[in-house]
Structures are given as structure tokens and as C-alpha cells.
Amino acid sequence: MLAKSTEYAIRALVYVQLKNWEGKRPGVVEIAREIEAPEAFSAKILQTLTRHQLLDSAKGRGGGFFFNDEQTELSLYKIIHVMEGDGCFHRCGFGLKSCNNNNPCPLHDQYKVVRDSFYDIVRKESIQSLSEKIKKGEAVLKRSIT
Amino acid sequence: MLAKSTEYAIRALVYVQLKNWEGKRPGVVEIAREIEAPEAFSAKILQTLTRHQLLDSAKGRGGGFFFNDEQTELSLYKIIHVMEGDGCFHRCGFGLKSCNNNNPCPLHDQYKVVRDSFYDIVRKESIQSLSEKIKKGEAVLKRSIT
DNA sequence: TCATAAAAGGACCCTGCTATCCTTTTATAA
DNA sequence: TTATAAAAGGATAGCAGGGTCCTTTTATGA
């Protein structure tokens, strides 16, 4: 459903949030290791996120990634939008270009329900809400080594 | 959500079903034109479908594609399974390899609902049920020219 | 039996997403 | 003020999915 780069982006941002709450600013190497993503590719993705101002970064010694605006919640929708556009919330499940209520494909109504409920999730959930769950131990960011 | 080739496959099969009901066996050229898909690529997909026996074909003059087993419904699930496997019904929405009820990612429960309801749709709906809708004029197979 | 219409099959190309590498810029601590 | 740690950025490789083309096989109607 989501592109791999988008999945990495979300995992990376959650990790940054968790570290920020500990007063730390992780760098690319650490982030990539912890979210189990390739290092160079993670760097590219973090670059994209900072360029679009979903994230802040500090260069030079002691630098790293962090959220400057601690107030506003960063919804998953915003991240998806930056990483791959929002086509997946509009496209027809059947592949038709002009599928809508007036000109519905045979799957239109059923698919719409699925697509819309996914949309609702990514509007509601945010980097902060996901990070909270992990902090509380209700969820995990990567495979638990056990 | 679905691969392009899977979308073409479903549209092609629906078209074949509609034509079969008229007592006709359409060929690749006609099918590709009517479902608005590239001809050579459609041929590849139809080949895959017949090889997996979701569809029958007759070579030579007067040949074409058709359903031999008129009784059994062909669910969308079967088509998806043949075209791209069923990974999309099991994969974690967050990209984690070992995400499950015991080791949930922060999106696990919400995403599961979406994924499962999509699964239900493709188990219930079939080439026949979609074709019926089009026959009754409740839905369209391609952009209505108007 | 032969010309022809049709599907089957194999080889290949192209594009976009995934991923890597190397250089440049920037900030800081010593 | 200089060595170093870190992100930014550009160029490019790898690969899978999407797509094309050409040859082979098969059936049939004339």
C-alpha cells in the first residue's frame, strides 16, 4: 500500500521523536541502524523530509535530526503526501481514469469504503501518537530481539 | 493497491464474461481495445491467466478467450493470487517483518481492519458479480464516451 | 492441403523506485 | 584557526514491473 520509502520515513520520524523526548538528536547512522533501513537511502529520505520542513536538522559536530515545532502534531497523511503524493486516496481500485459516483466502476462503492477508512487513519494518527504507543510499551518499532 | 497488471486482468476477464454471455469469444486485439490496455501486454496477461486455468482459450481461426467452467464463480481473490501473490493481505502497513498481535507495530490494529475489509471484498466479489452489475447498467467497464 | 487467423512463448527494452557513493557545505570543539 | 563530525546534494547503479516485438504453434475454412 505505502511505498517503501514512505515506510522508512515514518519509522525514522518516530525514532527521532522518541530520541528527542530523551533530549537527544540522532544522526543518520544511528537512525538507519535502529529502523533497520539502508543508511544512504535513509539519508536521502531524511533530506527530503527536512527540505519539506517536516523535520529540522543541524549540521556539524553535535548535529542531527529533531523536531523544532514541538507543538503541532505531524500526521501520517502529511508524510505520505510529501513522499508519494496523495494519489492512493483518489485512484480507482479498478484502474479506471474517470471512476466516480456518476460513472462508477463495479467496485466503486466497496473500494471507496476501504480507501476512506485508510484515509481516516492516516489523518488521525501522527508521529506523536505512534511514538506515545511505543513509549508506553503498547507497540514496537522493530522486531523485538527477545 | 493492486498492480496495474492485476487491474488489466480483472477488466479483461469481465469483458470476456460479458462477451461470452452474448455467445462470443473475443480475441486479444478486441479485448485490449475495449479495456483500454496495451495490446501486447494484454496478451501476456491473458496468457498467464490461461496458463493458471482461470480462463480458457482456443487457437486458430475463430479462436479467442472464454470461460469453460460456467458454473463456478471466479473470485477477485483468485485473480490477485495468480497475478501478484497474496502478500498484500498479510504485510504490515508499517513495513515491519514480524508484526503480529503479540509484537504489534503502532498501526497494527487499525491497519488490520482496512486490510481485512479489502480481503472480504475480493473474496465476495467475482468476475460474474462485477459483470452482472455492468450488464444491468449499474456500473461501467471504461470511461463512458458521452 | 494450404493460406490464414489466432493464441503461446521467448527475448528484450524502458521507466521509476530503490539504493549507493562521493563530494561539498556547515558547524563546533579543541 | 583548524581538524573533525555531521548533514546536504549530485551522480549514478540495480532491479522489478510495465510494456513491446518477433517467432512458433495450432486450428480451421476454403
Image (spheres, coloured by chain):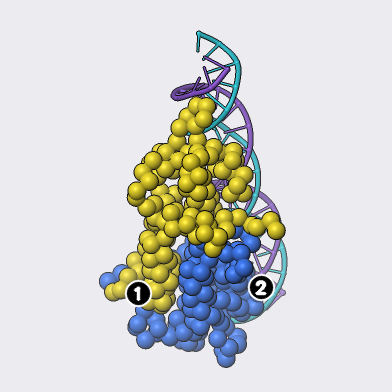
Chain colours: A blue, B yellow, C cyan, D purple
Q: Secondary structure at mark 1?
A: loop
Quarter where residue B143 is shown: bottom right
Q: Secondary structure at mark 2?
A: helix
Q: Position of residue B72 (x, y in %)?
A: 34, 50
Q: CA separation, marks 1 and 2?
A: 31 Å
Residue at 32% of width from left, 70% of height from top?
B100
Which quadrant: the C terminus of chain A? bottom left
Numbered disc in front, either 1 or 2? 1
Residue at 62% of width from left, 49% of height from top?
B36
Q: Is residue C24 above or below residue A17?
A: above
Q: Position of residue A106 (x, y in %)?
A: 51, 61
Residue at 54% of width from left, 63% of height from top?
B138
Q: Which residue is mark 2?
A: A51
Q: Position of residue C5 (x, y in %)?
A: 57, 28
Number of other residues with Cα within 10 Å of mark 1, as a class: few under 14, some 14 to 19, many 20 or more? many
Q: In this view of the protein, which residue sits in the foreground, A106 or B99?
A: A106
Q: Which mark is residue B104?
A: 1
Say what amino acid the circle numbered 1 marks: Pro
Label 1 chain ID: B
> Is residue B19 visible from the viewing direction of this image?
yes
Q: In this view of the protein, which residue sits in the foreground, D7 or B46?
A: B46
Residue at 51% of width from left, 83% of height from top?
A124
Q: Is residue B48 above or below residue C11?
A: below
Q: Residue furthest bottom?
A: A71
Q: Position of residue D2 (x, y in %)?
A: 67, 70
Say what amino acid the circle numbered 2 marks: Arg
Disc 1, disc 2: CB below 8 Å? Answer: no
